[in-house]
Amino acid sequence: MANREQTEGLLKIGALARAAGVSVSTVKFYAKEGLIRAAVKTGRNMAYYDPACVETIRRIRALQRERFYPLSVIKGLLESPAVAEGELALLDAIHKSGGEAGAPLPMGDAAKAAGLTAAQTAELVRAGLVETEGAGRRQTVSPSGQAVMALVGRRLEAGIPFAQSLRAFAIYQEALDRAAAADVDSFVAGALMARSFTAEAGAEMIRVSDETLDAFIDIRRREMNRTYGSRRLEDLDRFRRRLEAGLAALEAALREAGFPRAADLCAGAGEEGDALPQVREHFWGFARWAKGDIARAIAAALEGRQYFSGTCPEGTGEAALAAWCMRAAWLALAPAVLDCGGAARAAWAGFEAFLAERGARSLARRLEEELERIGGSI
């Protein structure tokens, strides 16, 4: 057992934690990892530390938060009496130091600053898009995590649903994770080890590699978004043409099956009651704007999806038959971007039941074949 002289001027673990501004568990972790050492141990669970450990802990925290060094690197720096400036520059380049300004914020404060709810923040953390430290009320969000949250908040303000932002960010993070791992391995083998190596040259190579790859990713992402955006617009125009072909096919099949009134109603040659004109309005609402007003065309397509997904035709007459045909065709022909697959299958099941009651099962098979020929999916 140590006497008073041995422990005089030393700090117990609680006092050390308070002085360094960390938790006792953090001090214990650093001690376990060999980053700090007890000056005197008076028992299995009692130790005293030199006051110099306060500054050591602060340095460890700074190297973690400001330069992003892992503990294995920090331990080596603490054990080295002097580290060359070039070596530090190389470490900074590897760990991308200096690009993240600010300080960690409590999770609640970070969510408030970004305009997000606690539930939304928790989802971002669960998805691995925002990293945190600590637990409970002491949980904090890093500056990079705050930046991600701010981006999500900005997208919300622009009307982009949170779920879509979560999905989009996750898509890019998953792809970038694979790309970064492969790139680092390739860079180490193909660049760093392909010539005489110095710390200064390595740091410069890494910085140039990062800058050029960032620029390359931005260039290619813009080009790809432009390409795929154009394809989605082409999908909308294709949808317009499919609707025209689909309606002609419906009309012909209905006439052949002995339902001329339903065929006339699909073609717009007559109106009956209040329901069918509304069906026709939603059926053609998108196509009316497809050639000249993309924004209104997209809005009309979304309205059509909502209407046909949630509205089930009523009645048993030919007006109801025409409404069922137009509903099933619209959903079956809708492009994948409108995500109508489930609604199309449900609508077709209802349509088949409607035709079965009228003894017209063959009409269902004929219409299914025609819609699939045009490009529909049931």
Image (cartoon, grey):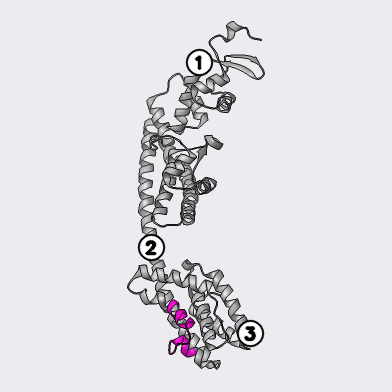
Q: Quadrant of the N terminus?
A: top right
Which residues, given as a range, are shown in magenta?
263-282
- Give the residue type that dot 2 points to: Thr
Farthest top residue in view: 5
- Between tags 2 and 1, which lies in front? 1
Kind of residue sitting beneath label 1: Pro
Please tell me whether residue 305 is drawn above or below residue 133 in the rendered image: below
Frontmost of labels 3 and 1 is 3
Q: Which sits earlier in the primary sequence, circle 3 or circle 1?
A: 1
The residue that mark 3 highlights is: 356
User: Between marks 3 and 2, how big is the CA–CA gap?
Assistant: 45 Å
Residue 367, by quadrant, is bottom right
Q: Characterize the local packing of mark 1: few (<14), some (14-19) or many (20 or more) Cα atoms within 10 angstroms.
A: some
Q: Which residue is mark 2?
A: 227
Residue furthest front as drawn: 274
Question: Which residue is under mark 1?
Answer: 51
Which tag, 2 or 1, sits closer to the chain's start? Answer: 1
